[in-house]
Image (cartoon, rainbow, N blue to C red):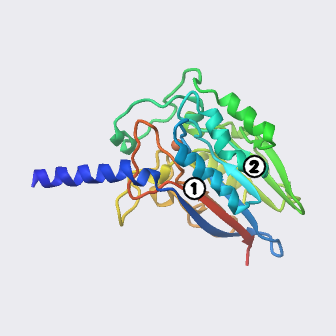
Amino acid sequence: MTLGLTGLALGGLVYAAGYEVRSFRLRRFEVPVLPSGTRPIRVLHVSDLHLTPKQRGKIEWVRGLAALQPDIVVDTGDNLAHSDAVPAVLDAFEPLLSTPGVFVFGSNDYYKPQPKNPAAYLLPTRGKARVHQPNLPWADLQEGFSTAGWLDLTNTRGTVDLGDLRLDFVGVDDPHLGRDRYDRVAGPASPEADLTVGVTHAPYLRVLDAMAGDGCQLLLAGHTHGGQLCVPGYGALVTNCDLEPARVKGVSRHPAEGGPGAAWMHVSAGLGTSPYTPVRFACPPEATLLTLVAAP
Ligand SMILES: [Fe+2]
């Protein structure tokens, strides 16, 4: 009996580390969030690459996303997993850098990954765990994205014009590290915008509440890895933040019960893992093409 269970666990680990962690998927959702009469907008949401320079398969897969011809790219952070990974990240995004884009950073853009037990992902998070000086070259990545014309939304508001449509963005630095300063970007959504989007790496409720309260109609986040180690037929056990597991990935509403004034939300399960916990189970790595359409 014990041998059988051990064999099952080992088999699961081999599958999770050897196959699923590299089984990249594109998910597609239609979100009815635009004013009536507005043409559709295609948003490519990419998150949590956790890239090392040798991950050629992931780099090529991300490069291939340019074939989707999105109207705009949203990167919700955790791009880096290695001190030398900035050129690899810019290589992965290179075919997309001529497309309008916005980005925020996550804890793993600032801090090198640390060795830990794979099961540690399932333990409660304390947040604000790393208080030292950032030790990854996040500023080089910021410069690379910004030079290409992507908008840095770190505790910042901004506007992207897509032809006849005006998209306003409200962004924060990573709430998982307590770096979010929503007070710097707070304020009601402009009636001049066709859409106001809130962008954060980690979907902590305080940030989602503030963004939805200010009239953001769409919220985009990453960080959760979709639960990373999930139970088939049940789903995620944890979100690595204070969002409940039912909204760990995919499209949902915020507040969760929906109703008038509720925002639409998309949480990306992301494309990577820490190099020290290279396992995914029942939660394949993903990027998402969101087609925003007019509300009925
Ligand atoms: Fe991540």
Reading the image, the residue beneath label 1 is: 267
Residue at (71%, 38%) from the top-left corner?
154
Report whether residue 179 is seen. no
- Residue 215 lies left or right of residue 267; in this view the side is right
* Image quadrant in which you'd find residue 137: top right
Type of the residue with mark 2: Gly
- Residue 212 lies left or right of residue 83; in this view the side is right
State the SS at label 2: strand
The 10 Å Cα crowd at callout 1, few under 14, some 14 to 19, many 20 or more, is many
State the SS at label 1: strand
Residue 33 in picture, x, y percent from top left: 72, 67
Reading the image, the residue beneath label 2 is: 101
Residue 204 in picture, x, y percent from top left: 56, 46
Type of the residue with mark 1: Val
Distance CA(mark 2)–CA(mark 1): 17 Å
Q: Earlier in the sequence, mark 2 or mark 1?
A: 2
Residue at (24%, 49%) from the top-left corner?
10
Report whether residue 135 is seen. yes
Residue 123 in picture, x, y percent from top left: 36, 42
